[in-house]
Image (cartoon, rainbow, N blue to C red):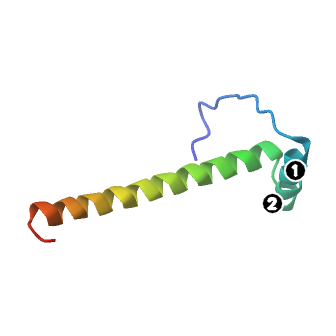
Amino acid sequence: MKKSGRKSYLLRISEELWENLNEWAAQDFRSVNGQIELILQNAVNERKKKNRKTEQETDAEHTVINGHKK
């Protein structure tokens, strides 16, 4: 995770969500901000992984179709 060039962003969340995040962060010895950043980074990484898998499946399907293997 790249730490330089960080952006600030105001986030409005419910008090209940804040309390849950605060508790979770404390269990992991992180700040709430650090916990939110970790959650978001994991979500982005998972989405990228899923998209790569979908692209590979699509490429494989095109190869089969164009290679006349159905």
Q: Who's the residue at 61% across and 49% down the image?
A: 41
Return the residue at label 2.
28
Residue furthest bottom in the image:
70
- Residue 69 horizontal side relative to residue 60, left or right: left
On residue 34, the disc is: none
Amino acid type at mark 1: Asn
Camera-side residue: 49 or 17?
17
Marks 2/1: CA–CA distance: 10 Å
Q: Who's the residue at 90% across and 49% down the image?
A: 19
- Residue 5 horizontal side relative to residue 48, left or right: right
Please provide percent x and percent y for residue 12: 80, 33
Amino acid type at mark 2: Asp
Task: Determine contact: label 2, label 1, CB under 8 Å.
Answer: no
Q: Total of numbered circles in the picture?
A: 2
Please provide percent x and percent y for residue 6: 63, 32
- Mark 1: give few (<14), some (14-19) or many (20+) Cα within 10 Å: some
Please provide percent x and percent y for residue 1: 58, 47
Camera-side residue: 8 or 17?
17
- Mark 2: give few (<14), some (14-19) or many (20+) Cα within 10 Å: few
Q: Who's the residue at 70% across and 28% down the image?
A: 8
In the depicted structure, whether residue 27 falls above or below residue 69: above
Return the residue at label 1.
22
Circle nearer the N terminus (2, 1) = 1
Residue furthest left in the image:
68
In the depicted structure, whether residue 62 falls above or below residue 41: below
Mark 2 element type = loop
Please provide percent x and percent y for residue 40: 64, 47
- Residue 51 horizontal side relative to residue 60, left or right: right
